[in-house]
Amino acid sequence: MGYDVRRVLVDQGSAVEIMYPDVYKGLNLKPENLTVYDSPLVSFEGKTVTPRDQIKLSIQTGSDVVEVDFIVVDAYSPYTAIMARPWFHDLEAVSSTLHQKVKYPSNGQVKEIVGNQSMARQCMVTAILHRPNTGSSASTKKNS
């Protein structure tokens, strides 16, 4: 659809691709484009999240296009989307967290997606600052 998505978390540990409201709104998707998805998800914080729905979209990476089923989650995230194992498998990709790169074969070549260290740091700081204040995890008592 020509929409350039930024702030994408590449997480080979996740089992489903997630789309957050920013991308959903940016793509001007309509409710009729969605299908029901009623299985709860567990967030990074261990909380159960009920997804809104699911949508299948064509995702272009370089010159390669793969179909991806996104779960639409109406929750806060500094990221706009999470790309997970199904996308890795369809693209036949391998990631390196050390080098912040994803490499994949394409037309007899090895192509790569390079992460942005500054953006990753900004997303991490935003996520930390957005966490609700739950108080100190350690408390001290004085004996009287």
Image (cartoon, rainbow, N blue to C red):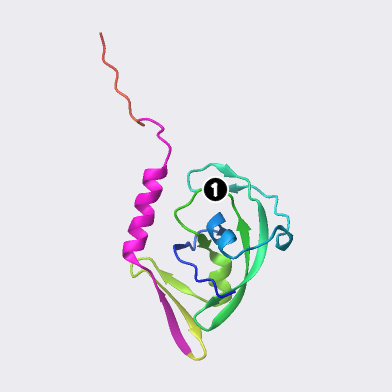
Residue 125 falls left or right of residue 10: left
Query: At 55% from the left edge and 65% from the top edge, which residue is drawn?
Result: 85
Question: Vertically, is 112 above or below 141?
Answer: below
Q: What is the three-letter code of the residue carrying label 1?
A: Ala
The quadrant holding residue 48 is top right
Residue 69 falls left or right of residue 110: right
Residue 40: x and y, percent? 64, 47
Instruction: Report which residue position mark 1 lands on.
Output: 75
Magenta run includes residue 94: no
Regarding mark 1 in the picture, which secondary structure is present there? loop
Using the image as rendered, state which of residue 16 and residue 123 is in the foreground.
Answer: 123
Residue 76: x and y, percent? 50, 48
Quadrant location of the N terminus? bottom right
Residue 26 falls left or right of residue 7: right
Residue 110: x and y, percent? 44, 85
Query: At 56% from the left edge and 58% from the top edge, which residue is drawn?
Result: 18
Magenta run includes residue 114: yes
Using the image as rendered, state which of residue 98 and residue 51 is in the foreground.
Answer: 51
Query: At 66% from the left edge and 67% from the top edge, which residue is drawn?
Result: 56
Question: Vertically, is 103 above or below 115?
Answer: below
Asked whether the viewer can see residue 94, the reply is yes
Asked whether the viewer can see residue 15, the reply is no
Question: Vertically, is 67 above or below 83?
Answer: below
Q: What stretch of residues is rendered in magenta?
A: 109-135
